[in-house]
Amino acid sequence: MKAINEVKMLVGKKGTTLTYLAQYLSEHSDKKYSLDTLSKKLRSNTIRYSEMQLIAEALDMELIIQDKN
């Protein structure tokens, strides 16, 4: 599944917007994000792990990598 679909699903579940995530990323990093920039990164799967960590934080979630067991 593409990152955009995953993030949109989580955004809907949490009752927020991609615009909010772009603003959160801008406020909590040294880069400026617009809705367009964030959407393009998610659609093209070029989003960084550090950006996904900030998205998880904005959604009050944890980003976890675990064994498939």
Image (cartoon, rainbow, N blue to C red):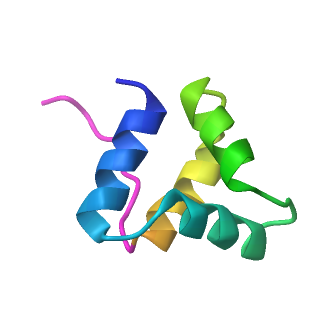
Quarter that holds the C terminus: top left
Q: Residue at x 55, y 50 (%)?
A: 52
* Residue 22 drawn at (x, y percent): 65, 61
The answer to whether one can see residue 47 in this image is no
* Residue 29 drawn at (x, y percent): 78, 67
Q: Residue at x 50, y 71 (%)?
A: 58
Q: Nearer the viewer, residue 67 or 25?
A: 25
Q: Is residue 26 above or below residue 1?
A: below
Q: Is residue 16 left or right of residue 31?
A: left
The answer to whether residue 10 is magenta is: no
* Residue 23 drawn at (x, y percent): 68, 70
Q: Is residue 17 above or below residue 37?
A: below
Quarter that holds the N terminus: top left
The answer to whether one can see residue 5 in this image is yes
Q: Residue at x 57, y 36 (%)?
A: 42
Find the magenta span and give its range: 60-69
* Residue 45 drawn at (x, y percent): 58, 26
